[in-house]
Image (spheres, rainbow, N blue to C red):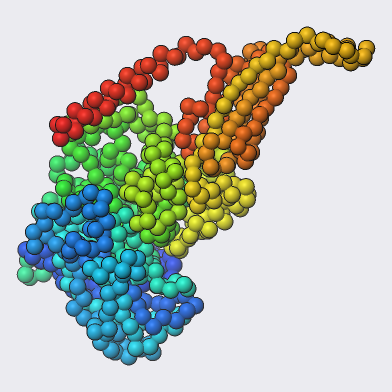
């Protein structure tokens, strides 16, 4: 009887708690502005996706709009005159040189109609569509279109559209496509732009731009042959086997701004749970290529490390799932991020300590924060996602694994140098030095002088800026600031001013002034210790009165060296630095220099000469493009042989690089 009462009690508790659990699971994190209900079918024989989407869109601004703007990203792959492919070709990337007719991709609208909802009546708008080229007026580019509405959508009002579309999956060019029986499907559907108070933000697809979209709920049904294993954004609700040899997979996720999916009959599927310190669990799914089976544990551990440290530093990961996709070779889909799903990547040979696949796994997961949760505009502020994520992945990697080994690949084979561990200070510096005076950091992604400059500024310079800021502020205050910035802007679209506002709260206006230079100003940071001069003072001579004579003799006996330390600002960026001077008697002096003047001279009268001096001795400013001029010594160094050795190693490295090139 007692056992029966206990059983009834358990059932009663379950019945009471289940609605609450379900309610918590379905609880959205933010206003759902752009909501998609999609039902699509993939035909692998023709590489065609057909289906429809019901888009429910709310005007979240204080301005009305009489038109809607959309992205059709896959139209970048429909001809070689698209803006994307023209920009790539100008950089020497011949991405479609060997394309056949069946290799091109596209996304075409079959019909577009307003559905009756709210104050809107049903109307077909298919003939109201117009292709737009807001960035370059390229008439061959069809990656953006607008549609005129029968009446404006007012602030706070919602409109519902039915869009039927047909998409041809391209041969892999970049980030998406089909390779043999492996599909990675990203930016594949008609996707509404972002309406802001200033108007529509809906850029064309560029070779060096990514994406920008509003948050919403995605409910997607994907039908394809049953043999295919599918992974996608969000939670798998159900998989229904149909009578025609296909299966319909139903995925659902709220509070995200994109939906991507992948399919292959070859995937090995592994699942594990990660428990957060709060007790909440996140399910990790690994979709692994069979030839990378040996990397299973390394992939899973990398995801767990990323979850652990990102949740600690930037706020607990809020979603219940994360899927890591190991992409097929030659699919050109590796190293990309989408909400709750990302692609990593590995070579055939990736020894531990080589940063692969761990580094790329952490980086792409990290984008789930900076671009995923903190929804920056990747078109206009690329450093705010790539730079933040590059900083994140370095911090997580070094915290979890320690410094990686210096690694080079020759004829496709990795060569590790276990004796050479890469210090965190070295991450990104060489890329930054190449382009320090080439571009400012804040530039639209397609407006940099070159792809090299885009990468160096958006990734390396921004990472070095954050790491320098961490050293300048101190770790505790810095991490508090970063967590505040992150969580405050989850499910929002912050701009540089929003980040600087948080920095000012924690570090003051002087720090913001420094960051403004690094973000918006042309030029480089280069502080130099220019000279050390020790003048031996002669004994006092000349006419002195009795008191002065005594004072002069006393001063001479105690301070018989006049020391001059000259520091210079060789770069355009002005930062405060410390200057350390060491004297022969072992004493040291540390000075503060504002760095605002072109030069400053520190002068002392001392009993012993200066033997060494350094500007920025603690290496706070990692963006300094020339560390070799930061210190001087008047003493001969026993390490002078290193100069010749490093020069010899330099030529050896380049000789091996040439051999690798000839053998490739």
Q: Quadrant of the N terminus?
A: bottom left
- As rendered, which of 342 and 473 lies closer to the eye? 473
545 over 590 or under it: above or below: above
621 over 629 or under it: above or below: below
Residue 430 picture location, percent across and down: 39, 36
- As rendered, which of 265 and 386 lies closer to the eye? 386
Residue 307 picture location, percent across and down: 38, 47
586 over 215 or under it: above or below: above
Residue depicted at 28% across the width and 78% down the height: 130
- Farthest right residue in view: 546
* Horizontal relation, residue 512 to residue 328: left or right: right
Number of numbered discs overlaid on the protein picture:
0
Residue depicted at 36% across the width and 80% down the height: 67
Residue 573 picture location, percent across and down: 54, 43
Q: Quadrant of residue 215?
A: bottom left
Residue depicted at 41% across the width and 30% down the height: 423
Residue 145 picture location, percent across and down: 29, 74
Residue depicted at 14% across the width and 62% down the height: 104
* Horizontal relation, residue 610 to residue 440: left or right: right
* Horizontal relation, residue 514 to residue 608: left or right: left
Q: Quadrant of the C terminus?
A: top left
Q: Is residue 325 visible?
A: no
- As rendered, which of 608 and 280 lies closer to the eye? 608
Q: Is residue 177 visible?
A: yes
- Farthest front residue in view: 542
Q: Quadrant of residue 235?
A: bottom left
């Amino acid at each position: 009887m007692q056992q029966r009462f206990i059983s009834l009690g358990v059932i009663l508790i379950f019945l009471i708690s289940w609605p609450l659990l379900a309610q918590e699971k379905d609880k959205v994190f933010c206003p759902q502005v752009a909501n998609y209900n999609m039902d699509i079918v993939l035909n692998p024989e023709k590489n065609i996706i057909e289906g429809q989407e019901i888009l429910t869109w709310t005007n979240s601004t204080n301005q009305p709009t009489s038109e809607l703007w959309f992205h059709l990203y896959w139209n970048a792959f429909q001809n070689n005159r698209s803006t994307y492919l023209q920009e790539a070709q100008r950089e020497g990337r011949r991405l479609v040189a060997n394309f056949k007719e069946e290799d091109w991709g596209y996304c075409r609208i079959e019909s577009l109609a307003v559905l009756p909802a709210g104050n809107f009546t049903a109307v077909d708008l298919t003939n109201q569509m117009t292709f737009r080229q807001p960035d370059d007026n390229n008439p061959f580019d069809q990656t953006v279109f607008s549609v005129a509405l029968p009446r404006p959508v007012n602030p706070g009002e919602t409109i519902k559209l039915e869009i039927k579309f047909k998409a041809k999956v391209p041969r892999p060019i970049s980030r998406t496509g089909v390779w043999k029986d492996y599909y990675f499907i990203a930016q594949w559907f008609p996707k509404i732009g972002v309406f802001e108070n200033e108007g529509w933000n809906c850029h064309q697809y560029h070779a060096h731009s990514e994406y920008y979209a509003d948050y919403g709920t995605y409910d997607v049904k994907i039908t394809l042959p049953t043999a295919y294993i599918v992974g996608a954004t969000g939670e798998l609700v159900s998989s229904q086997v149909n009578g025609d040899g296909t299966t319909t997979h139903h995925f659902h996720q709220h509070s995200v701004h994109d939906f991507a999916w992948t399919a292959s009959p070859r995937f090995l599927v592994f699942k594990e749970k990660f428990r957060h310190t709060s007790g909440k669990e996140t399910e990790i799914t690994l979709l692994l290529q069979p030839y990378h089976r040996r990397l299973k544990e390394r992939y899973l551990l990398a995801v767990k490390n990323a979850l652990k440290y990102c949740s600690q530093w930037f706020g607990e990961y809020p979603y219940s799932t994360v899927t890591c996709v190991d992409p097929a070779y030659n699919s050109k889909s590796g190293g990309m991020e989408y909400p709750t799903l990302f692609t990593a990547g590995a070579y055939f040979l990736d020894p531990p300590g080589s940063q692969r696949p761990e580094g790329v796994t952490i980086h792409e997961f990290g984008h789930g924060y900076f671009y995923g949760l903190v929804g920056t505009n990747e078109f206009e502020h690329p450093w705010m996602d790539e730079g933040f994520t590059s900083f994140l992945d370095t911090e997580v990697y070094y915290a979890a694994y320690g410094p990686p080994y210096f690694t080079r690949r020759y004829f496709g084979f990795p060569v590790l140098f276990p004796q050479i561990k890469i210090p965190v200070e070295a991450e990104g510096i060489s890329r930054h030095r190449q382009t320090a005076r080439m571009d400012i950091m804040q530039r639209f992604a397609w407006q940099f002088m070159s792809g090299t400059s885009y990468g160096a500024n958006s990734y390396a310079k921004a990472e070095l800026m954050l790491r320098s800021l961490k050293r300048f502020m101190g770790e505790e205050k810095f991490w508090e600031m970063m967590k505040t910035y992150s969580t405050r802007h989850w499910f929002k679209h912050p701009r540089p001013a929003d980040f600087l506002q948080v920095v000012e709260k924690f570090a003051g206006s002087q720090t913001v002034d420094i960051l403004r230079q690094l973000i918006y100003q042309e030029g480089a940071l280069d502080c130099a210790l220019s000279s050390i001069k020790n003048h031996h003072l002669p004994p006092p001579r000349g006419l002195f009165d009795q008191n002065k004579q005594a004072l002069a003799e006393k001063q001479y006996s105690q301070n018989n060296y006049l020391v001059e330390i000259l520091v210079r600002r060789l770069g355009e960026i002005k930062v405060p630095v410390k200057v350390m001077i060491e004297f022969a008697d072992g004493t040291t002096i540390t000075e503060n220099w504002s760095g605002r003047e072109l030069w400053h001279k520190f002068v002392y009268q001392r009993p012993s000469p200066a033997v060494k001096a350094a500007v920025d001795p603690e290496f706070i400013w990692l963006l300094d493009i020339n560390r070799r001029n930061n210190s001087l010594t008047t003493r001969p160094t026993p390490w002078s042989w290193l100069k010749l050795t490093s020069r010899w190693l330099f030529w050896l490295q380049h000789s091996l690089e040439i051999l690798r090139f000839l053998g490739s």
